[in-house]
Amino acid sequence: MKRTNLYFELIMLAIIAFPIAFAVYQFPNLPDTIVTHYNLKGGADGFAEKNFAYYLILPGINLMLNLFMFAVPGMIPDEQKAPSTLRILQATRFATAILLSGIAVFMVTSAAPHDAPNIERWIGGGLFLLMLLPGNYMKEIKPNDFAGVRNSYTLEDPGVRKRTHRRASYLFFYTGWVGITAAFVIDIPYFLFISIAALIILCIASWQISRIEHQKKHG
């Protein structure tokens, strides 16, 4: 394993392990009855007896997802292993791990019944991070079987694929940047739903871009 890859994997391991270490540290201070769910208004509406296994669920999911994404480059044919493809896969892994670890830490800090921190901002900001980081590398991505905008238009024509990724890259990157900034600067109602809607709209917009580019070239 190259040294740069080793550093990245150690960082990923630290991100995934941090919520577990944080839960171990905080567990003795948690109440016997913990909050397991908050409604959209920030009020506690789900409770359970304190159980450390509860705080292992999300880190476990995070670890399994990370192991799967770690294995993906090994499934890519050698001729498709361009640095840009590997970078976008790493960016997706990093953003996913940050999002899930952030939620796992929130589960610990919000265990006591009180007004919850604005989890919408953190989850919404994490989703926008999932747009920003891959979007930063999307314009450089080479043809492959795993990452990027894959539909009938981009698969049929390499030129359409290249132009689609270039234009979609800017949409994803700047939408992610604006969303992350808004998450911590502006108090926006229903921010989580806005972030999910933005992700769906970007996916639809990417398909629309590829359709338009295909029509320009093929009529």
Image: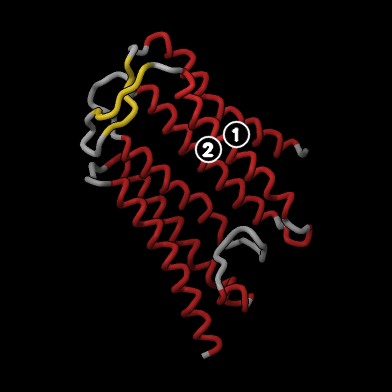
Q: How many numbered marks are there?
A: 2
Which residue is most to the front?
49
- Which label's residue is closer to the chain start, 2 or 1? 1
Q: Residue at x 61, y 50 (%)?
A: 89
| Relative image position of residue 73 (x, y in whole percent) | 70, 50
| Relative image position of residue 117 (x, y in whole percent) | 29, 29
Q: Residue at x 28, y 41 (%)?
A: 185
Tell me the distance, in whole angstroms, between the alpha carbons under discs 2 and 1. 7 Å
Residue tagged by mark 2?
A: 97
Q: Are marks 2 and 1 in contact (CB under 8 Å)?
A: yes
| Relative image position of residue 7 (x, y in whole percent) | 67, 33
Above or below: residue 39 compared with residue 169: above
The amino acid at mark 2 is Ala
Left or right: 134 with respect to 157?
left
User: Which one is nearer the viewer's eye here, 5 or 78?
Assistant: 78
Few, some or many residues within 10 Å of mark 2 (<14, 14–19, 20+): many
The numbered mark at residue 79 is none
Few, some or many residues within 10 Å of mark 1 (<14, 14–19, 20+): some
Which quadrant holds the N terminus?
top right
Residue tagged by mark 1?
A: 12
What colour scheme does the image use? Answer: secondary structure
Secondary element at tag 1: helix
The amino acid at mark 1 is Met
Left or right: 145 with respect to 201?
right
Q: Quadrant of residue 160?
A: bottom right
